[in-house]
Image (spheres, rainbow, N blue to C red):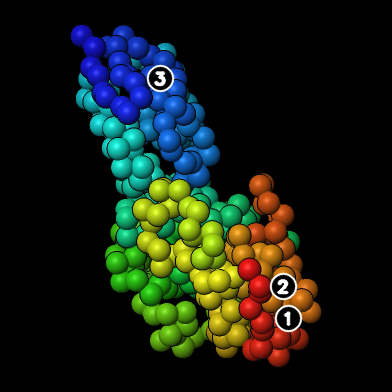
Amino acid sequence: MNSKVSTPSTVLEFSADSSLEIIVDQVAAVLADSDLSFGHGAESAEDEAVWLVLHACQIEAFEDVQWDRRLKLEQRRTVESCLSKRLQSKKPMAYILKQAWFAGFSFYVDERVLVPRSFLGEWIPDQFVPWIEPRRVHSVLDLCCGSGCIGIASALAFEDAKVVLSDVSPEALEVANKNIDRYDLGNRVSTHCGNRFEGLSQKFDLILCNPPYVSDQRMAKLPAEYLAEPEIGLRAGVDGLDFIRPFLAEARNFLTDKGYVVVEAGSASGAVELAWPDVTFTWLGTEHDEMVLFLLSADEFDQYESSFLTSRTADY
């Protein structure tokens, strides 16, 4: 007996004898044929279909998969239910599954936080070598932490470091604390609530920040999946620098003399270069872009102090 799920454009039938591979192909076809946007943990309909079906089967992404296996009835129903929710709500799949992957680790997520997808995840496992000497990193601040994925992945990479997860949203910190408990890191990772550096007193060897950087113009064009996320984690004014500008003016006060800051500027990277034309930013290359993450040392903050204290707004 076939089970069915109705979608806006088709009726999907999961036969009891359909293999995992066939069901993935069917789900991918439906997702590709729908008015959806990808990029929240999956870059395509095919990737999202694999994620959904493996999750329903409780198969981790790194496990060997027997693609010819058959799904149990309960697993097929889970796929149908989650697919239906995805199509009807247009929310990111991560919110529906309550799961996202970052830097090789699984994290709990829900609508209280952005879906983890920072480019920082490409550098954390290798401890930012060669730019940073890992043995010198004893304290890390994850500012705008959201789910805590950046700071927790850093704690797992820098095994001797103490990490503070800080966010202006108490709701986001509730999610971050769930993930701290998930990895049993309560002895090394703590949370703090405040806007930027508000309420912090210590200095850090490494400050990581994935701040809001979406300009007003870009916000107006975002697909539904992005609008389902907390706006406070995305919107950053006319040029996308409403957070980054005061952050750079304040960061040196919370950095050790041999410390570093790594910031994801994303779509505001061009605005960063325009706002501080005399600053030589070190841009860390990523798989998809050569200019989305910048690194600054404490010495560079000292060198460009006057520039960071007075910057202009880009004409966007």
Question: Marks 3 and 2: in contact by CB < 8 Å?
Answer: no
Side of 154 where 180 appears, left or right: left
Secondary structure under badge 3? helix
x%, y% of residue 105?
46, 48
Location of the N terminus (image quadrant): top left
- Residues at marks 2 and 3, CA–CA distance in whole angstroms: 47 Å
Q: Residues within 10 Å of mark 3 (few under 14, many from 20)?
A: some
Amino acid type, mark 3: Gln
Return the residue at label 3.
26
- Residues at marks 1 and 3, CA–CA distance in whole angstroms: 53 Å
Q: Nearer the viewer, mark 2 or mark 3?
A: 2
Up-down relation of residue 149 to residue 188 (above or below): above
Return the residue at label 2.
274
Is residue 255 visible from the viewing direction of this image? no
x%, y% of residue 6?
27, 24
Question: Marks 3 and 1: in contact by CB < 8 Å?
Answer: no
Q: Earlier in the sequence, mark 1 or mark 3?
A: 3
Residue name at image x 33 percent, y 67 percent = 173
x%, y% of residue 52?
38, 33
Callout count = 3
Secondary structure under badge 1? helix
Location of the C terminus (image quadrant): bottom right
- Residues at marks 1 and 2, CA–CA distance in whole angstroms: 18 Å
